[in-house]
Structures are given as structure tokens and as C-alpha cells.
Amino acid sequence: MLYYREKLAPAAWLVVAIGLVIPATSLIFLPLNLFLGVAVGVGLWAGAVGLLWWRSPTLTVDSGHFRAGEATLELRYIKAVTPFQQEEARAQRGVSLDARAWLVIRGWIDPVVKIELNDPLDPAPYWLVSTKQPEALIEALRSAGATT
């Protein structure tokens, strides 16, 4: 049973910002052909946005597992889950970050969830995961059977 699913897709502002490749490419190709420059710019923009979308990790919670991108964590190894937003989230991604932590973070998503582990064989003390809906993710983890 699937309890939660979220794709960490690129934000709208990022898609617009990548659009700056269109005028930059047009300027490069201006001495040759303006239409060619715009066409190449649009192609580069579409390729970059498509690649960002395609490679964006997906968070899923199902019966017994939490998946963040290509990594899988059995729910029985979750000790605690804590949400962080704004300044606290920035600290968790920066000065408070343990170098051994498993990270699935995206710069365009502010909130993060810290998932502390109780697996003695895992070298990572916790997972730090970006999510647009931290409370919904935590509730899904609880509903699926994580000991949070």
C-alpha cells in the first residue's frame, strides 16, 4: 500500500531562470543567424529543464519502506523524524550537518525532514531529506508503521 509520494521537481523560478540560456545563446549566434540562436537556446532550455525533471528524486512511503530517490530505508530502522523549516532547515543543511548523513536535498525546496536511524550497521546517523510537505511525510511514515 502506498502511503505517500512526492516528486522533488524543479521550482517554477528555476525553470524561468534557466530560460536565460535563450538570450545568451541568441547573442552568441547573432553574427550568424538570430533564428538559429533562438532555436538552439530553446533546445538547450528544454533539454536542461527536461533533465532536471527526469532526474528529480521521488519520495515514497509504502508498507515497510521509505524511498528517497534510489535509496531505500526499512521503516523498522527509523528512530525519530523531525521537520525543519526556514532558518532551522538552513542550519540542518549547513552548520549542523553531520558529514556521515545520507542526503537527498534540493536547493529549491526549503523544508527538510531529519530521519534518525537506529541501525547499528549503518554508518549514516540520519537521513536529511527535502520535502514540500514535511507534516504529510511524517504522518505517512507513522501510518506505514515507522516507530517515530
Image (cartoon, rainbow, N blue to C red):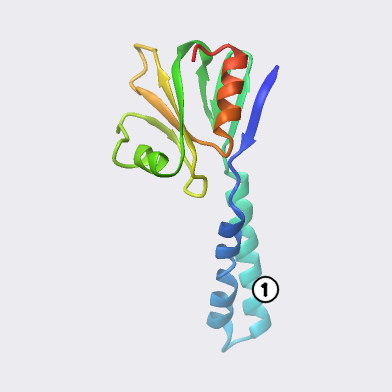
Query: Which quarter of the rendering shows the N terminus?
Result: top right
Give the residue drawn at x 35%, y 40%.
Answer: 91
Residue at label 1? 39
Give the residue drawn at x 56%, y 89%.
Answer: 31
**Circle 1 residues within 10 Å: few <14, some 14–19, many ≥20:** some
Residue 36: horizontal and vertical position, in percent? 66, 79
- Quarter location, residue 123: top left
Secondary element at image label 1: helix
The one of 85 and 50 positioned closer to us in this rendering: 85
The amino acid at mark 1 is: Ala
Q: Is residue 124 above or below residue 47?
A: above
Q: Is residue 24 left or right of residue 99?
A: right
Residue 96: horizontal and vertical position, in percent? 30, 36
Q: Name the residue furthest right.
A: 1
- Quarter location, residue 14: bottom right
Q: Is residue 35 left or right of residue 51?
A: right
Q: Is residue 21 above or below residue 92?
A: below
